[in-house]
Image (cartoon, helix red, strand yellow):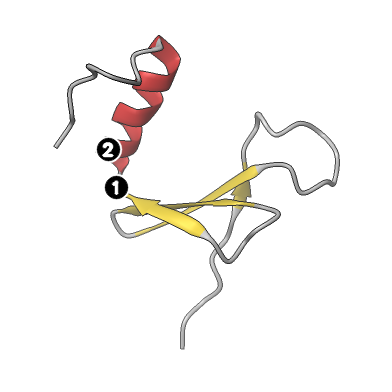
Amino acid sequence: MTTAAQWQKSSFSGGGEGNDCIELTSASATIHLRESDTPHTGVTTAPIPLAHLLHGIRTGRLGAGTPRCD
């Protein structure tokens, strides 16, 4: 028997009850992300690649010429 994932809404999603937010959950060493208005479509990643992605977003370093984080 599997248990249902406990999805958490991003704190940057705003207040309302609308479906305009990113949700995440984790299991073992994986992180699952989904858009709340399409909950059956998502992305699965590990903490380190996600940290690199978030760092790239915060620093504006995404795009051509950005080194890969393999």
CB atoms of marks 2 and 1 within 8 Å: yes
| Res 51 quadrant in image | top left
Q: Residue at x 18, y 29 (%)?
A: 68
Q: Is residue 16 left or right of residue 37?
A: right
- Structural distance between the alpha carbons of marks 2 and 1: 6 Å
Amino acid type at mark 1: Ala
Q: Residue at x 35, y 30 (%)?
A: 53
Q: Position of residue 55 (x, y in %)?
A: 36, 20
Q: Say if 30 sits above or below 14 in the image.
A: below
Q: Residue furthest front?
A: 64
Q: Is residue 48 left or right of residue 44?
A: left
User: Element type at marker 2?
Assistant: helix
Figure quadrant of the C terminus? top left
Amino acid type at mark 2: Pro
Q: Position of residue 61 (x, y in %)?
A: 34, 14
Q: Say if 64 sits above or below 42 in the image.
A: above
| Res 64 quadrant in image | top left
Q: Say if 26 sits above or below 55 in the image.
A: below
Identify residue for label 2: 49
Q: Residue at x 43, y 53 (%)?
A: 43
Q: Position of residue 34 (x, y in %)?
A: 55, 52
Q: Residue at x 29, y 28 (%)?
A: 52
User: Element type at marker 1?
Assistant: loop
Q: Which mark is residue 57?
A: none
Identify residue for label 1: 46
> Number of labelled discs?
2
